Image (cartoon, grey):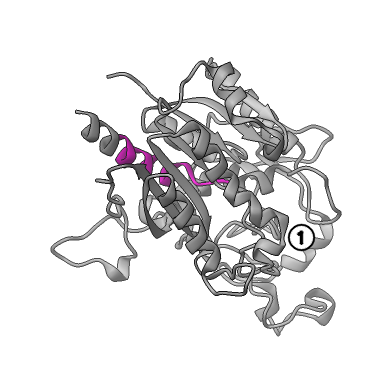
Amino acid sequence: MQPLQAISLFSGAGGIDVGIQQAGFTVLACVESDHYACETLRTNIAREHHSTVVYEEDIRLLDPSEMMEKLGIAEGELDLLCGGPPCQAFSQIGKRKSLDDERGLLLFEMVRFAKVLKPKAIMIEQVKGLLNAPDSKGKVGGVFELLVSELEALGYIPKWKVVNAAEYGVAQIRQRVFIVATLGRNGFQFPPATHAAASNNSVLFSLPAFATVGDVLQGIGTPERKNGHVPQHSHLDVTPDGDRFRMNGVPEGSHLAAQHHLPAEQRRNLTKKDTTKFKRLSRYEPSNTLRCGEIFFHPLENRYLTPREYMRIHGYPDEYLLSGPIRGRSGRVRHLDQHRLVANSVPPPVAAALAKEIAYTLRSITS
């Protein structure tokens, strides 16, 4: 069969690209503004000998017509336009400024590109907060309604669902809303879960249990300690001695703020709300959602999880390589470090599951 062709916007470290490639799509181009994310994309494109073009620039300055000309595609030829625009404007743990935050407006770049490219299908990933984010008039859910109406005005039939990554084999409880829209007709159905929480499994129709942190970290080996270079495999321990001290005595699966028996100089100013700060994961459960604000700690050792361990939890293949520095949590950086690159990205197994169903739908429509 003729390979299906895709363009990814807001590509980040490439999680969505890895997934859709696993589903049989060829990625013609990626658009991303973060430098280390683009270096990551280029590194893996070269490693896999792909011809994908990486646009390292502000998407608002990019002309989709010029992109089409450069890539040699005509209106309506592209099979899939996909992307995960910045989510901070809609995140429930942020200030939720919605369209008052310029990052919220970036969501509608997906629509701007769709108007010109007229792809057969669109896939958008966002935080759940998008569903009730207020519009410029304060209407709850107004931003989502506007997005759906603009897609419908272009002839698309959108469907959406809150997807838990753990239900597709990712060792992480991560809920995100995915919007899939196909042009003209929509036989698309969100794929059924492949995994389930052990407590929700029935005897007759049981699914494999959620993957756990212990499952995916098996055999990964001892990380290198910080020694002036970043190993290509990203398995580097950069935990400061002070954080090692603070995590000492925190039991597996718990967090420092809950350890009232530990000295005050160890707990410091943490409050009962700080359930993800100085959080030690459990080998027997999926991880909490990986986020940019903290690095979770190893289930047994007094150290941060390494970026490579984060990649295992997120569902990246071991041969995938990250670029850029590996940093602790202190200080502000202009570009995303390796932990943040992973946490910001779409888990590849989720992208793959949805993209396989999109591919099936598109081929069914044209057959």
Q: Quadrant of residue 197?
A: bottom left
Please name the residue shown 59% across and 17% down the image.
Answer: 70
**Which of these two is toward me, 118 or 93?**
118
Across and down, in percent, residue 156 comes to: 38, 46
Give the residue type that dot 1 points to. Answer: Arg
Q: Residue at left 64%, top 74%?
A: 275
Indicate the position of residue 363 as horizontal and vertical percent values.
25, 31
Q: Is residue 348 magenta?
A: yes
Instruction: Report whether 158 appears left or right of 171.
Output: left
Q: Residue tagged by mark 1?
A: 244
Give the vertical position of 141 relative to 214 (above or below).
below
Q: Which residues are magenta?
A: 345-359
Q: Position of residue 248 (x, y in %)?
A: 72, 67
Q: Is residue 35 inside the magenta stretch? A: no
Residue 40 x, y percent position in the rendering: 65, 31
Which image quadrant: the N terminus? top left
| Residue most extreme to the left | 204
